[in-house]
Amino acid sequence: MIIVMSPLATKNQIDHAQGRVREFGLEPHLIVGAERTIIAGVGKEKPGLMSHLEVLDGVEKVLPVVAPYKMASLEAAPVHTVVKVLGFQAGGDRIGVMAGPCSVESREQLLELARLVKQAGATALRGGAYKPRTSPYSFQGLKEKGLEILAEARAETGLAIVTEVMAPELVGLVSKYADILQIGARNMQNYPLLEAAGESGKPVLLKRGPSATMDEFLLAAEYILKTGNSQVMLCERGIRTFEDHTRFTLALASVPYLQQKTHLPVVVDPSHGTGKTSLVPAMTRAAVASGADALMLEIHSNPETAWSDGYQALTPGLFLETVKSAGVVASALGRKLG
Ligand code: PEP
Ligand code: MN
């Protein structure tokens, strides 16, 4: 159930409405928007509850939420959430661009790519310091050293840093360096990790599990939202299908679908979604055309020598061209890339 407070509601009225929600056995969660506050009442609803809440001072309306994901649903916050960190913005009139290597490999590599990314108009720098690898014998990331390098790149360029956190006990450490915590596809349903990331208060980029349905994806986001952290982005990064001409199948219809169901910004990762450099530029433009609020792109100065995911990395030249042509699509839609 969603209790929409009037824009003029006072703090006392909001507190009182929350108290009433609690008295009726529901857990109230506040969603504080720019214009108005919404209270999501989560739990088993008693009959007649809506009419008890509708009459409270400061309450504009009370809505039932049919979707299983209460706080993520569009009904919970009819205005789409915009996530802003430093110069990065996902949602509204801007399409954020997060770009960088799959893995942080060295200080020189990252700083060179950070400068390039910045020059091309990206607003966030990605780079894995803790890497979820299929084989335990593959490179696992530079760990804290990688985080230090990312922070150095932010200090020089002002780019927001997005990097993966793989375990709840690492959330504290990764949060010291990162501006946005990435939850990888393999961890989409690691619920203790989702809660720990939510409690950090940092914006969270939640990647879709390779076999997750939309409801499972949105319910995973709900775990983060339930901690009181409303800065959640959903990232479509491809799913596992019978198809084998691409690494994953980039399910772009999820972008408009999610935007009909949730107020959270939707990000597309055409790099992991295709797993092939040559397919990334076209799918980046398609992602923008589908309504994505941000993009995540992997780049490398010399993909052949990359320590991970080189086969899907854009070279600097291709990255510049891709951002330029995707920018044209964005302007046709009245939005701005970067
Ligand atoms: C990544 O972003 O490098 C990554 C490992 O992504 P995913 O979790 O989508 O596989
Ligand atoms: Mn990667």
Image: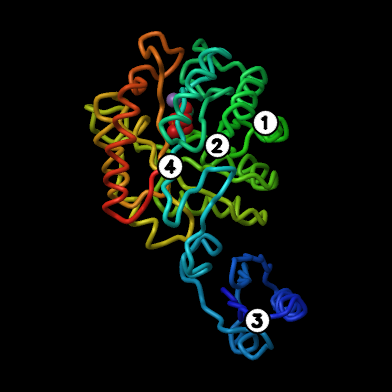
Label 1 beta carbon less than 8 Å to ligand 1: no
Q: Residue 271: x, y in percent?
A: 36, 30
Write down the residue under mark 4.
338
Amino acid residing under circle 3: Leu
Q: Which residue is mark 1?
A: 177
Q: In the rendered structure, which disc, 3 or 1, sits on the residue that comes first in sequence?
A: 3
Q: Position of residue 86 (x, y in %)?
A: 59, 43
Q: Which residue is mark 2?
A: 182
Up-down relation of residue 304 to residue 267 (above or below): above
The residue lying toward the viewer, choosing from 231 and 317, is: 317
Hey, what amino acid is under mark 2? Answer: Gln
Q: Is residue 292 left or right of residue 206?
A: left
Residue 8: mark in rendering: 3
Label 2 residue near ligand 1, CB within 8 Å: yes
Kindly identify the amino acid type of the residue bearing the numbered disc 1: Tyr
Q: Nearer the viewer, mark 2 or mark 3?
A: 3
Disc on the earlier residue, 3 or 4: 3
Amino acid carrying label 4: it is Gly
Give coordinates of residue 203: x percent, y percent: 60, 46
Mark 4 crowdedness (10 Å alpha carbons): few <14, some 14-19, many ≥20: many
Give the Cα separation between the discs numbered 3 and 1.
38 Å
The front one of 332 and 56 is 332
Q: Give yes or no for contact between labels 3 and 4 (Cβ–Cβ under 8 Å).
A: no
Do the residues bearing badges 2 and 1 touch, measured as CB atoms within 8 Å?
no
